[in-house]
Amino acid sequence: RFKAVIFDLDGVITDTAHYHYLAWKQLAESQGVHFDHEFNEGLKGIDRMGSLDLILASATRSYTPEEKLALADVKNRHYQELIATMSSADLLPGAVEALDAVRAAGLRIGLASVSKNAFTVLGRLGITDKFDYVVDAATIARGKPDPEIFLRAASELGVAPADCLGVEDAVAGVASIKSAGMFALGIGHPFVLTQADVVITSLKEFNLAAY
Ligand code: G6P
Ligand code: MG
């Protein structure tokens, strides 16, 4: 039925969400902003500057664009330290099996992550060559929930959006897939990912023939 499957990275293939959490928490608290797991949930799938804006909205003062860039850089360097030791052991259960099942079915495989660290993470996980096309987040103007990143992946794979299955763990990501006109497979809880066509708990339950 589908001609391509386009995966999100963070929270779908590997759990970098925890590293983003640690790095944002330190940055937020350095600016006197309380930061917890609940706040972090709302940042999933949101790009770096968008996430920073959401955090600084709770700060007691305003920030110049230069200050914001400097703070985003502090967070990113901390995040890069945290991901430097990642390896194939950090692949989420079922991720490689799902990628291999899509390949075996003869479908194209794309990656649509708004993370500018996605190439580094794929390299650390040792799965770069499993993808036919990886969107370079630096070339994307509008982050999720805008459909731009999933539409870019589909067009680079040479497949119509209606023939694509998108896989996402974030509310903003599922919204991006749906507004791109694709079938959305959510990874998480149905009561959170309400816009998804089907929701499974993890890629361990991935079954291409079922969607
Ligand atoms: C993913 C994560 C977000 C993160 C974003 C940007 O979408 O889910 O939590 O903020 O990527 O990541 P970056 O590595 O570019 O700062
Ligand atoms: Mg994600």
Image: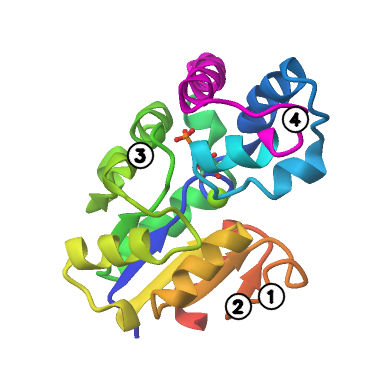
Q: Is residue 92 above or below residue 156?
A: above
* Disc 3 residue type (three-letter): Ile
Give x and y (percent) for residue 144: 48, 57
Indicate the amino acid at tag 2: Val
The residue wearing badge 2 is 198
Which one is closest to the eye, mark 1 or mark 4?
A: 4
Q: CA distance from mark 2 to mark 4?
A: 38 Å
Mark 3 vs mark 4: in front: 4
| Mark sitting earlier along the chain (1/4) | 4
User: Crowdedness of circle 3 by 10 Å Cα count: few (<14), some, many (20+)?
Assistant: some
Mark 2, residues whose alpha carbon is within 10 Å: few (<14), some, or many (≥20)?
some
Q: Which residues are magenta?
A: 56-85
- Residue hosting label 3: 127
Say above or below: 97 vs 104.
above
In the image, 13: left or right of 58? left
Query: Alpha carbon of mark 3 to alpha carbon of mark 4: how far?
Result: 39 Å
Q: Looking at the magenta stretch, what is its main secondary structure? A: helix
Q: On residue 194, which mark appears?
A: 1
Q: Position of residue 41 (x, y in %)?
A: 72, 48
Q: Between residue 87 and residue 140, name the one nearer to us.
A: 140
Q: Dot 4 corresponds to which residue?
A: 59
The structure residue drawn at horizontal position 31% and vertical position 57%, both measured from the top left corner, is: 110
The location of residue 132, given as percent across then percent down, is 22, 53
Q: Does label 3 or label 2 sit earlier along the sequence?
A: 3
- Mark found first going from the N terminus, 3 or 4: 4
Type of amino acid under label 1:
Thr
Classify 10 Å Cα crowding around label 1: few (below 14), some (14-19), many (20 and above).
some
